Each structure stands twice: as C-alpha cells, then as structure tokens.
C-alpha cells in the first residue's frame, strides 16, 4: 500500500510524540528521515515526500510573497530534497551553482576574445562533471573492448538530475554571454533558480529568462491557480502510479527474459512501453508544474499530446519540449541551422539528435536511438511537400505511422542491449502471430484493457481533452479536496508496495 511506503518512521515518531514517549525512541524513528539512500532516491510519489511537503507548505504559507526569507526557506528545502537523493554529492551541486554564478558575472564584465575564452572555459567546467560521472565508465569500457586496453572502471554513481541541471546552467551562461539576459546580481535568486526542487531532478529544463523574472513577482494563490495545481498533481499521480507502473510490470517481464516471449508479446511490450514512458515522464512533469504553481511559480509545459503528432518533426515539437528547444537553441542553431545549405542542414540536424541521444545515456542504444530519430527527421524534410495536405485521413495515417516509428525506437530505451533491441524488433515484425490474441486475453486481460485505456487517453482529439479539462476546472473549489482524496484512495487500492522511480531519474 502506498501509505506504508517512505513515511512509516515519521508517522511512528508523531504518534509517540502525541503519547509523550521518551525522546530517544522518537529520535530513533526520525533518524531515517534525515538519512539518504543512493539506491532509493526521494521522489514525488513517495508518501514520505508527500507528508514532508505538507508540513513544508504549512510553514511556507506564513512568509510574505516577496520575502527573502521565503526564498531561503525554499532553497533549504530544495537542498534537503536533493540531499535525500544524492547525499554527499549535494556538495558538488552547490559548488557548480556558486562557480557558475561567479563565471556569469565575469563573462558579463568582459568583451572580445577574453569573453569568448571565458565562456569556453565555463562550458568545459560545467560539462566536466556530467562527462565524468555519466560517461567515464562508458569510454573506459569501449577503450578496453576495441583497443584491448586494461583500464579499470569506477562504477560511478550518477548524481540525480545532473543532466538537467547541467543543461540549465549552460543555458544561463550562454544567454548571459549573448546578452540575452543580464546576470543575476543576487546569489539567492540564482541559487533559487538552480535548486527549485519541482524541476530539479527530472526537468523540465528551465530557462533563466523564463524563471528569474517570476522570483520578484510570484503568482497569487487564487482559486483558479489552486484548482489547476491540484488537477496537475492529481493527474500526474494517476498517470504514474495507476498506468505507468502497472504497464511496467508486463514490460519488465518481457525484457527480463526476451527470448521467452513471442513476437506478438513483444509487440504488446512495445505498445506498453510507449505508453509507460509517456505517462511516467508526463506524470512527473504534471506533478512538478502543479507543485510549482502552489509555490507561486509557473513552469512551462513539457508535453503537448506527442502521440497525436502527424509526423516526426511535429513529434519533437511536442515531446520533452524543454529538451527539444534546448537542443535547437544551443546546438542546432549555433552549428548553422538551416543557414548553410541543405546538406549541412541535415548534418547539423543529425549531429543535434546524436547529442540528444547521448545525453539520455552512456550506451550505444541511446546513440543509435538519436541517430535513427535524426535520420527520420531528415527523411521527413526530404519528402514533405511544400504545400501540406490537411485532409483528415492523411493526418490520421501520419499519426499512426509516426506513433509506430517512435514506438519501435523506444525499444532501444528499454532493452538491456542494442542486440536485444534488434532481436525484439525482428520478432515483433517478422514473427508476429495475431492468432495469439485469444490466448493472451485469457491469460492477461488486464494488460489489453489497460493498453486500450491508455490509447483512448493519448489519441483522444486535443479539442476534446481541453474541453474535458475546462469542465473539470469549472467545478467548485470545495469539491477539489474530495477529488484528490478519491484519487489517492484509487492509488492506495490498486498500487503495489514497490513504487518504481521515474524513468527519467536515470538520465
């Protein structure tokens, strides 16, 4: 049950306080709350976090909206949140924040070649930690395999969120260099921007130009804002705990022993993982956006019905939007974009997607995934007509085709190796027997039903979804606590004890 996870010791301590039991036993119960576990990061769907967040918000409500102490309070909680996930690596995170803050001030004060040289140093410095922790063992393993060297791997722990906060820091430094934003003169503001816990460990990647102005002008907590926040948090919890985690059971079963399942079962695993990764990651983004709204800040949308994209270009404008825009603005356009001829445009596009794939993980699976998406984008640009055809049936075929292209490539995310990924694709395309449906339905009807329910959600027309959201938001505010409690009860009834970490925590 969800309520037994993460918060048991805290509940015991509160119970003993109410009974007036001895101080030593209370400390024994509370102590685990202040420790960290690198193998079990603190995340939004853990009851211990939700209970702590409730207490944090009570204290947060006592501060004035624009109080500096309010910022300090939130920064301290954000640092504690990160500590619960990465322990002593919090020191690394704080060090990166401090040095990048000073580097941005120095970049802004210089001109000419010295300014560019300092920017290069700043980028190398910021990237060095990501490259070391995320890619050191990958490089060593490949050197040992292909050059027959004998370097030892370190089995380094990847600091939670390092891919996200590194890109966030880089965007700040580059924007200051380009004079698109002034450097923050207040270290508290910059520290708040970098540590803000809702987006800290799995995005969205927040730009300083979008977030820093909000610090001095936070959102008032109106009825509309509170309803939107509760809707986002409730939707995110349901997406993650009722859909993504349940689909993960079947996906994990297939990929733990891929040779023991048929092509039909691999095809269902492909659909299941396609829905799992969407509901998992968009669920996280929904919770992050909802919590940020409660705190008075608005994060940008990270998903816009990506599986309704009629082509691969449209998909990348709808999926993980903050990363797509980051890659466009800080890699594709600086390389030359579409300004240096058709051939180089395609080279730049392919390079950008390769970097995007490698950003996701130090494994050839992700490199191939990025390469394949780059090739699909190039093919789409080559074949797309100058005058798009807006006939509904062509758009429908485009949605189906794009979804299946994306789904096949998701296999490289989930499979344990690139060889297993290709074998899975071979099985589901060449050895797929639809006659197995009846037997599968008899054995696992819940998988089929959940796949159909997931498809209904993701393929529902955008206008219908927005209309439904507007109707829900129009409900009176007094009903919202009841809606949230009903959602929690559903989660408690149907969710297993083992809550899975968010997929994008590993990136």
Image (tube, rainbow, N blue to C red):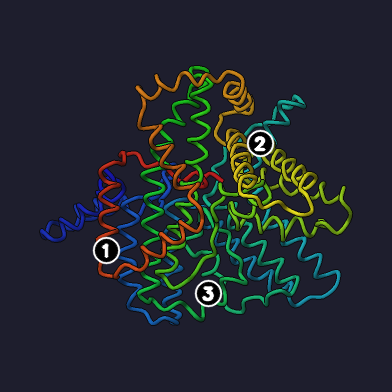
Q: Earlier in the sequence, mark 2 or mark 3?
A: 2
Residue for badge 2:
138
Give the percent coordinates (x, y) of residue 396.
59, 45
Foreground: disc 1 or disc 2: 1
Vertical position of residue 135 compared to residue 71: above or below: above
Q: CA distance from mark 2 to mark 3?
A: 36 Å
Q: CA distance from mark 1 to mark 2?
A: 48 Å
In the image, taking residue 3 as reference, residue 128 lies left or right, namely: right
Who comes first in sequence, dot 1 or dot 2?
Answer: 2
How far apart are the two marked residues, 1 and 3, measured between alpha carbons? 34 Å
Q: Residue at x 46, y 47 (%)?
A: 279
- Using the image, determine if residue 123 lies above or below residue 298: above
Tell me which corner region of the image, top left, top right, bottom left or bottom right, holds residue 287: bottom left
Q: Element type at marker 2? A: helix
To which residue does mark 1 refer?
481
Tag of residue 358: none
Q: Determine whether, in the image, residue 28 is placed left or right of residue 309.
A: left
Looking at this view, is 16 or 247 the one in front? 247
Asked whether the residues under the numbered discs 1 and 3 touch, taking CB atoms below 8 Å apart as contact, a structural biologist would say: no
Residue beneath disc 3? 188
Mark 3 Cα-neighbour bin, 10 Å: few <14, some 14–19, many ≥20? some
Q: Nearer the viewer, mark 1 or mark 3?
A: 1
> Of residues 186 and 435, which is closer to you in this image?
435
The secondary element bearing badge 3 is classed as: helix
């Amino acid at each position: 049950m969800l309520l037994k996870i993460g918060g048991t010791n805290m509940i015991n301590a509160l119970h003993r306080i109410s009974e007036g039991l001895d101080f030593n036993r209370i400390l024994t119960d509370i102590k685990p709350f202040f420790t960290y576990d690198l193998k079990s990061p603190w995340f939004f769907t853990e009851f211990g976090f939700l209970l702590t967040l409730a207490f944090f918000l009570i204290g947060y409500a006592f501060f004035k909206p624009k109080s500096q102490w309010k910022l300090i309070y939130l920064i301290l909680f954000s640092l504690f949140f990160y500590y619960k996930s990465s322990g002593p690596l919090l020191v690394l995170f704080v060090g990166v924040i401090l040095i990048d803050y000073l580097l941005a001030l120095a970049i802004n004060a210089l001109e000419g070649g010295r300014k560019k040289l300092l920017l290069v140093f700043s980028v190398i410095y910021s990237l060095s930690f990501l490259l070391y922790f995320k890619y050191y063992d990958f490089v060593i393993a490949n050197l040992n395999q292909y050059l027959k060297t004998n370097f030892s791997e370190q089995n380094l722990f990847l600091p939670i969120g390092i891919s996200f906060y590194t890109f966030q820091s880089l965007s700040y430094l580059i924007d200051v260099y380009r004079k698109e934003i002034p450097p923050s003169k207040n270290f508290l503001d910059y520290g708040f921007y970098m540590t803000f816990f809702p987006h800290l460990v799995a995005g969205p990647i927040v730009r300083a130009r979008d977030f820093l102005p909000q610090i001095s002008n936070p959102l008032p907590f109106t009825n509309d804002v509170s309803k939107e926040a509760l809707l986002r948090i409730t939707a995110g919890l349901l997406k993650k705990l009722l859909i993504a985690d349940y689909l993960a059971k079947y996906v994990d079963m297939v990929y733990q022993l891929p040779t023991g399942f048929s092509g039909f079962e691999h095809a269902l695993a492909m659909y299941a993982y396609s829905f799992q990764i969407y509901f998992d990651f968009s669920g996280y983004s929904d919770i992050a956006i909802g919590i940020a709204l409660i705190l008075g800040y608005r994060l940008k949308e990270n998903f816009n019905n990506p599986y309704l994209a009629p082509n691969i270009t449209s998909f990348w404008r709808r999926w993980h939007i903050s990363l797509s825009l980051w890659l466009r603005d800080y890699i594709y356009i600086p390389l030359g974009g579409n300004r240096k001829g058709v051939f180089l445009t395609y080279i730049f596009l392919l390079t950008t997607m390769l970097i995007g794939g490698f950003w996701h993980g130090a494994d050839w699976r992700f490199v191939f995934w990025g390469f394949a998406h780059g090739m699909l984008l190039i093919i789409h640009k080559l074949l797309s007509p100058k005058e798009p055809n807006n006939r509904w049936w062509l758009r429908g075929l485009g949605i189906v085709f794009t979804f299946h292209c994306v789904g096949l490539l998701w296999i490289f995310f989930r499979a344990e190796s690139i060889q297993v990924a290709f074998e899975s694709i071979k099985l589901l395309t060449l050895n797929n027997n639809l006659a197995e449906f009846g037997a599968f339905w008899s054995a696992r009807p819940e998988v089929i039903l959940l796949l159909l329910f997931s498809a209904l959600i993701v393929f529902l027309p955008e206008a219908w979804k927005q209309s439904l959201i507007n109707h829900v938001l129009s409900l009176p505010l007094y009903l919202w606590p009841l809606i949230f409690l009903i959602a929690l009860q559903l989660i408690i009834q149907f969710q297993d004890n083992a809550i899975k970490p968010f997929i994008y925590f590993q990136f």
